[in-house]
Amino acid sequence: MAAPLLSIRDLTVEFHLRRGIFTAVDGVSFDIAPGEILGVVGESGAGKSMTGSAIIGLIDRPGRISRGEILFQGKPIQNLPVEEMNRLRGKKIGMVFQDPLTSLNPLYTIGHQLVETIRRHLPMTQEQARERAIALLGEAGIPSPAERIDSYPHQFSGGMRQRVVISLALAAEPDLIIADEPTSALDVSVQAQIIKVLKRLCESRGAAVMLITHDMGVIAETANRMIVMNRGKIVETGSVGDVIKRPREDYTQRLIKAIPSIRDETIRHAVPAADRPLVEVDKLTCDFMLSKSTLDRLLGGARSKTIRAVNEVSFSIPKGSTYGLVGESGSGKSTCARMMVGLIRPTGGRVLLDGDDVWAPGAGSQKRRRRVQMIFQDPYASLNPRWMVGDIIAEPIRALKLASNRAEIEDRVADLLERVRLDPASMKKFPHEFSGGQRQRIAIARALSSQPEFIVCDEPTSALDVSVQAQVLELMRKLQDEYGLTYLLISHNLAVVRQMADNVGVLHGGVLVENGPVDQIFDDPQASYTRMLLDAVPDISRVN
Amino acid sequence: MLAFILRRLLQSVVVMLFVALIAFSMFRFVGDPVASMLGQESRLEDHELLREQLGLNDPVFLQFARFIGNAVQGQFGISYRLQTPVTELIFSRLPATIELAFASALIALVFGVGLGVYTALRPRAWSTSIIMSASLIGVSLPTFLIGIGLIYIFAVELKMLPSFGRGETVNLGWWTTGLLTTSGLRSLILPAITLSLFQLTLIMRLVRAEMLEVLRQDYIRFARARGLSQRTINFGHALKNTLVPVITITGLQLGSVIAFAIITETVFQWPGVGSLFVNSVQVVDVPVMAAYLLFVALVFVVINLIVDILYYVVDPRLRVDARAGGK
Amino acid sequence: MSTTPPESAAQIAASTPPGWFRRAAQSDILYSFRRSPIAMVAAFVTAVLVLAAVFAPFIAPYNPFDPSSLNLMDGFTPPMSSSFAGNYFLLGSDNQGRDVLSTILYGSRVSLFVGISATLFALTLGTALGLAAGYAGGRIDSVIMRIADIQLSFPAILIALLIFGIARGIIPPSRQEGMAIAVLILAIGLSNWAQFARTVRGATMVERQKDYVSAARIMGVGRFTILFRHVLPNTLGPVLVIATIGLALAIIEEATLSFLGVGVPPTQPSLGTLIRIGQQFLFSGEWWILFFPAVTLIALALAVNLLGDWLRDALNPRLR
Amino acid sequence: MKKLLLTASVAALVAGALPASAETVRWARVSDALTLDPHSQNQGITHNFAHHIYETLVDRDVAGTLIPRLATEWALGDDPTVWVFKLRQGVKFHDGADFTAEDVVFSLDRARSDKSNMRQLHASVESVTAVDDYTVHVKMTGPSPLYPNNLTNTFIMDKTWTEANNAVTVQEAGSQDDNYAVRNTNGTGPYKLVSREVDVKSVLELNEAHWAETKPFVTKIEYTVISDAATRVSALLSGEVDFVQDVPVQDIERLSSSDGVTVTTGPENRVIYFGYKFGDAPLKSSNVTDKNPFNDPKVREAMALSIDRDAIKQVVMRGYSIPTGVATPPFVNGWTAELDKYPAPDIAKAKALLAEAGYPDGFTVTLDTPNNRYVNDEAISTAVVGMLGQAGIKVTLASRPIAQHSPLIQNAETDFYLLGWGVPTFDSAYIFNDLIHTKSGHYGAYNPGGYTNPDLDAKIQSLGTEVDVAKRDATIAEIWAVVQADRVLLPVHNQVLAYATKKGFNIAVHPENQPRIYEMTKD
């Protein structure tokens, strides 16, 4: 093995918080060889991003490197003066951040930002730098780069912007790229392309990559070597194949076990046969009017723009089963969910619950309120931070007047908390005292408190770490058996859907392109979109 | 762009109409205009005659329409107190106020932005704490006290600067300026400082807050990661992005300097529209009050328009969307 | 990804036992308060001034609002000396023989009463309109916010003057004095509501998009219940900040109006009235009549402003 | 820029044309003349300014005696209802036109026209005729022995100029017509108007063609308006102005003691007093809702006993006032030292009187006071509130600018008020007409309290036509006796004026507060 490009020894990053010292990175040591792709994986709080920031010298106060060495090409760089570090950044070490939407300055053209970076590090004239910038953009897969170079960031889509960001990181031919969750904000199909671009560009330049991600699948498909981190420490290091197939450490084993795969076939409980499905969705349609002001209408005639977010979607869900609705962002899956629970009024079509239209006034809506509940994606936003947990869970009981007696309500809340595996004493606490997974359990308890039959789960686990995700999914399954619940599970994560759903629908641009039993869809997809989607998903089973 | 400006213009007209309605209501409700026009010697038939002449017996909406019609032509009648056409009065006072407002706006802008940037870039420095504390004192001091204090120190005790008025002015035909004579410039110093202090602190705190916000943004982090120099990041990226939201509020703040000048003009006997307004309020000279109100609204509307257009120029997200229509 | 350790605060907090007292004691606000000497001094000064104002009748050596207790011959006594009539004045006496210390105590009472009432009025009005604008959206929103925009572009003092003028025109002369304070509160309150409306509207627009509101809507919770039980409590943080800074502004505004002579009756002087009276004696050597009330006004406004400033930082998690 | 240079050079030329002994006086006052139309407003500040540009037939000197100005002599004619005025010859208006009798006829007619604010002073004029170029006859409706007293503020305009500029009709307050005479002048006075910025600054320049033999040493007047008292004083101290006419009493001492400033004080022909609401109707602002406490003479006596005039003089007025027991200044015909006596304050007696009148616990009432018209007006009222409070009368003070205070007086919307009264005719009749006579027609305009006494009304009316001076004076004394016995008004003091000048400039205090810069002298 050649001399390492980057060598980290006993790196420790501490945050001096008011309740004591928080050690974000704790004695981490590893090397990166030239041209190597090193994957760093771990759950949130593992310290992986902090390690990346430490290398490029971007740790914000109150954090600081308290111990250890960062050797770049043999020279220590952890305590360089700002100006010297600036010359190193971009020139020797490039960085790519997670969110391409916020990584670029919105007020400058991408050309300006590229030329500025190139001329900062390379002795080039404005024209030369501009030519180089166009070439870079072309390599990164931006179509007609010579024209697009004078566009502003907001004129590009998310995936295109991330290509621009990668070009920027590579603009001065650095030897190391630190990519911090470069694809986590992107859709699966775009994610695959970006990974490919990153890998190709770095290989062609011989640049090493430190790929930081929470998604083991991405690493499995991309990296040579990988590091698993937990709570600031390195748990396991090794080749990707070794670590994924033969994890040595207990933590790694649990982590890998928790990752659902689109190839897993989980044995599901038997769905009781029924005459008619509990939920029937019939040609559900939703149009959004891009409203124009009166003056615009006067100036521009009467045409106003309509966007059809959901287009005649029909499916049905038998009682006690789970229906998975998958699609990328903007496919209309959340709009569908919101129409089904009564948050958005459909433009056309019907949602029938036990044969009643949930949007019909009177019995229908009344029934809906009682029997339909929803679990949201963000467990931070779905619980009112000013309410105590007990009140949050009791809200449906009070709103629907299911019980009025204080003691009775309290009993029910305590019971619900136990059922979601939380201490009944939690009812006197506030949401901020709980972790994300615990909060999602509270949200589930609230959804259950009106004893509904049908629960719409909108990306219930996408904000959670994999291990927590596995617990929450397990809980949902148990509760389904216990109460005979019917779920609509909305997710962009195909693996989760495969694991949970009995039937699946694939939404693309508001149209249901495929609909059927889960195994049929995953094993033998008919629609080309579904196939593309399944191919694009990075999966640990694909490890070489 | 055209549609954008047209829409803004239409909104401006609505704003003006709204303010005009308030101004008109003053005529109607602040005492009986006839009683305030005719003295004790008047007879009842005089009242009736004057009511008729002034059209006060017409339906209210007709009177309002007439008020608007006259206002559009710049006619607000004749001041009860000074018996001079209000428009002429306001125009003769305008140069003083505009020069004062302009001078203090300049002070507020230069020092406000400068100190704001400085304190944002050195968030933990001692000098920053001192500037920030001083700015709070600036906000807590009533303008009239600042004025009195400055007069006492610089005019009475030190006899360095004049305590009142505009000094010598030069008549340029339609504009009288105090900027071309030494005494005029000397007279401008104290009132301009007094008037600017409040806006200065506001702008400074605003720039600081916005800049700190911008410095936290991902694109600044990314710019650092690209190895750009501190200078380029601070002044090329952060400052420009700071200015976008600052433009709106600063623009409006500077616009309000004109109306805010009321107190400063009173304390320094500055012969501008603000002191004209205060004198008019004391004797309920409604035509002047109404005209002043509309004038301030007009300034607001015009500045708003300029700010919107500036915003358009500075922020490509608005500009390009309108031209190319997105992705 | 942010470099702040995610959830660390929550994790640490989750390990602490419940109990509202402990929670409050460990809350971010109190912690940041204890760490900020400026905030503590400001709070102390505010508390002293407020308490002194509230208990003025018990503390003040004289009652300056009781004309019958005044002796004109006590007039213009310098600080820390006795008048011809034999009365001792710590901070001197004014042109009416009123004890400056007592007038300041009673004057702060008037200033604070007007300031707090006006701020509460502005808060109530602004919050209600902001909630309505933010939750209803559409036309109601644009009308309310447009009015707020216009109003914000006029200095509060101009609006207060106008309202004062109109009130003078409407109220019959014999009732004007009795209603002077009410008119003042109305004028200052009406000139300051827009800030509240703007802030509450912004917060409401953010909150109403949150999933917990959706959750409540799904279970059929009524519009008003959602507004008052869910949205309103979550907008209170910024409202508290604006209210504190607004209180300082209202106190200054009252002083300015009184200084311009359109404020409270001269027999019940507020701090602004005292400054207006004292200003006449700036050149004649009786500096104490102006000086002490001015210092008190500045101290009060500054302390409240500092509190507001600190509160803003303390409630804004990103600044910590 | 070109224009600017031109203007500047013209200014330089003008400046160069002035005599070598050019002397400028920068004169600061609290407010500006309301208008330049000499007949439009009957107001002291407006008249004071006009006296420098326009002239009157007769004038009053600092001692208060009538002196000739445009009229050289005047006397009652053979017909006792005709006043004969001989006019000064060789007088020219600023535009060069000759001053003749037709201008006087025109001006007097204009002054008594319907829209003129001066018309009540000429109410008893029947007609004005020019006998020859320099003699004018004024025919009165009846004997009017004191008519020339009314002429001291009636200015003479040029007939031709006024007609040519369409300004024959007097500018009326609130009228929406633009009047040429409001902003342009053409008088015979010692100064010509050079420029005027309303409310800011007016510049006057010596009229070289003026008729007076002695030329004033001041060749240029810069009249500056500084409404804020502190600023006015500081402007004088910092040398930015030369003459401050309205000096606050509290600053007199400091100004006198500072180098380079001279302060001149003297009595003004103005009395400050309080007035009551009379009649049986209960007061609007009182807690006594079934009757009017002021209607009880005992209450009025108690109030008079509660007020300590000497304390007001010493503390509020800093010694610059002349306490009085009668509502007339000493300048005025009818004033006597006997009337002027005032009682020593006696709170105990006041309380006893109130108890006797049925108000052992006092009562409440609102006092309306102006706050920008008289010297320390608001402070006087505040002090009186305290003094009445000691007697048990709880007074709420309502303080307003004079512009809002006067409508209350004119519309009789006040229960208890402070007012100052100047007597331009120097005769008690002027006081009786407006303050004592029942409010009706031209009489009682400033009697908002509604005091009425038919016997007195008759006597007051007789004063206007009584030619026998002794008999007339006797009637005046009789009226004063009743007014004092009835305690119609509650006088406080006569105002004292203070003028401050840069050291070297001398000007005497004018009893009507109408100092003439052309009478200013230099050491």
Image (cartoon, rainbow, N blue to C red):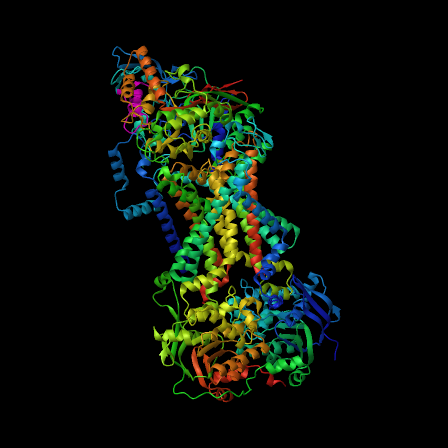
Camera-side residue of D375 and D156:
D375
Q: Which residues are magenta?
A: D98-125
Q: Is residue D104 magenta?
A: yes
> Where does the image place residue B27, in percent across and percent down from the top left?
34, 42
> Where does the image place residue D4, in percent across and percent down from the top left?
48, 37
> Where does the image place residue A265, in percent across and percent down from the top left?
54, 88
Quadrant that contains the C terminus of chain A: bottom right
Say which quarter of the image contains residue C217. bottom left
Say which quarter of the image contains residue D372. top left
Q: Is residue C117 magenta?
A: no
> Where does the image place residue D483, in percent across and percent down from the top left?
34, 20
Q: Is residue A144 visible?
A: no
Camera-side residue of B97 and D499:
D499
Residue A438 lies left or right of residue C202; in this view the side is: right
Q: Is residue C124 above or below residue B74?
A: below
Camera-side residue of A52 and A422:
A422
Camera-side residue of C22 and B118:
C22
Q: Is residue D95 visible?
A: yes
Residue D364 lies left or right of residue A49; in this view the side is: left
Q: Is residue B215 above or below residue A189?
A: above
Q: Is residue C25 above or below residue D155?
A: below
> How many numbered marks appear?
0
* Residue at position x 57%, y 81% in the image: A538
Quadrant that contains the N terminus of chain A: bottom right
